[in-house]
Amino acid sequence: MGKNPNASVLLVDDEDMVLTSVRAYLTLETEFTIHTFSEPEEAVKHMQNNPVDVVVSDYLMPRMSGIQFLMKARELQPEVSRVLLTGHADKQSAIQAINDVGLYQYVEKPWDNAQLLLVVTNGIERSSLLRDLRSTISELATANTSLKDVQKRLLRAFL
Amino acid sequence: MASLGRMLANIVHEINTPIGSILSNNEVVVRSLDKLQAMLAAPDTMPMEKVRAIVETCRSLAAVDEIACQRIASVVRGLKTFVHAGDGEFHQASLQDAMTDTLKLTQGEFRRRIVVETDFGDVPPVECQPQMLNQVFLNLLVNAGHAICGEGKIVVRMRQEGDQAHISISDTGCGIRAEDCGKIFASGFTSKPAGVGTGLGLSISRRIVEEVHGGKIYFETQVGVGTTFHILIPIQHARTADPPKE
Ligand SMILES: Nc1ncnc2c1ncn2[C@@H]1O[C@H](COP(=O)(O)OP(=O)(O)OP(=O)(O)O)[C@@H](O)[C@H]1O
Ligand SMILES: [Mg+2]
């Protein structure tokens, strides 16, 4: 599953243990670039300057919850696929929050590596499709405006 | 003491994170070994750099596993002191150790939002029923945790004062309203929703401290600022007050 070698995956969890384990797995199984953050604030800073395909965030973190972080992530990069990693106890509130952040998927802790990989891989696919779509739309829009320009000039020439 | 059930749910959650890590790491190590073995069979198929990276990863995962196991072990150690219901006899015991064990149980619930500070002075071993006092400590700590909404701090102090040990647990929680102050030790009084509190914690705690140990429990509180519960336990148990039963 080494496709999309340039894809960038961002992991946020206040547990370094989780970050190390997930990073090791994804590094072994994929060519994705993995960035890990134990402070959501740092992850936000990273996202201000670097395009990301998938963010996987813990739910319960001090200072900034996973939901707050994912909302920030959406603001910064609307196409990024947002995945929540939740402990069993907070599943209910996590599900409630799905609509608030336009969550792509949630994965329960203890997580299953194969499932997580599938979610991340599909998330990358999804965000790159969205990006393509957006650029096609803006190309169309540009084409449309230049058509209008031509139309205007033609009109001006004839009127 | 439904909060004990909640506490157990938290402990399960607390153990789940390290277990999740260990399981994942185990899978990664096995897969890494597969890759290394394949590489040994056909040495030129994998760049040395990649091999080194795999070995380094496995090393870092072993370090994570060690931390994860320690986390589980520390929660389990904390639980052990509750397993024996207590033999009903008084022992010389370190209250510092008892409190440290109990604090381990609350770690899961507190870690993400509450800072716990301990300030243990030199308190000699106290003649007590440590399992029972653990229950008192747990009740007070859970209450303090519930009183703090969002982030806050709990300070646990321990001092010798004359022939008594003085333990105090302060929180930066909501405080107790004046009209409730006279009721909180009553059995069944709770301000918490059903399923969270049964209102038994403090009445049991008072029985354990005052009737079983001949000590004292009281509190100071200020609404919006916080609450401190104080416990006094005689260092020598007065046998006349509670003759040892066979
Ligand atoms: N540290 C505290 N800060 C604010 N209020 C407190 C504190 N400790 C106790 N209380 C109040 O006293 C009440 C009774 O406490 P108690 O421990 O007896 O019962 P509970 O915590 O409600 O339920 P449980 O049986 O689960 O302990 C609480 O519901 C709460 O209103
Ligand atoms: Mg209580």
Image (cartoon, grey):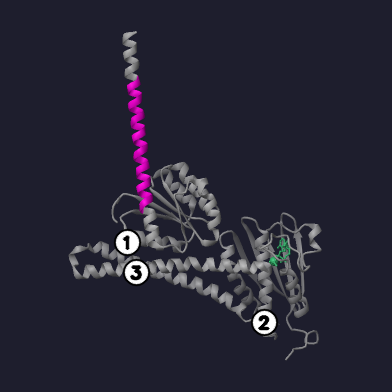
B40 or A152, which lies in front?
A152
B146 or B47, which lies in front?
B146
Residue B133 in magenta? no
Q: Which residue is tagged 1? A: A28
Left or right of A31, for residue A84: right
Q: Quadrant of residue B208?
A: bottom right
User: Between marks 2 and 3, how big is the CA–CA gap?
Assistant: 47 Å
Do callouts 1 and 3 mark residues in contact (Cβ within 8 Å)? no
Residue B117, image x, y percentages: 62, 65
Q: Indicate the quadrant containing the N terminus of chain A: top left, top right, bottom left or bottom right.
A: bottom left
Disc 1 marks which amino acid? Leu
A126 or B37, which lies in front?
A126
Disc 2 marks which amino acid? Pro
Q: Which residue is tagged 2? A: B125
Tell me where the magenta segment starts and ends, as one range.
A121-148
Kindly identify which chain the residue marked by label 1 belongs to. Answer: A
> Residue drawn at (30%, 63%), measured in percent from left and top?
B53
Q: Quadrant of ligand 1?
A: bottom right
Q: Indicate the quadrant containing the C terminus of chain A: top left, top right, bottom left or bottom right.
A: top left
Residue B165, image x, y percentages: 72, 76
Kindly identify which chain the residue marked by label 2 belongs to. Answer: B
> Residue drawn at (60%, 74%), measured in percent from left and top?
B101
Closer to the eye: label 2 or 1: 1
B194 or A152, which lies in front?
B194
Share a chain, discs 1 and 3? no
> Residue drawn at (42%, 70%), measured in percent from left and top?
B65
Chief SS of the magenta region: helix
Disc 3 marks which amino acid? Val
Residue B191, image x, y percentages: 73, 60
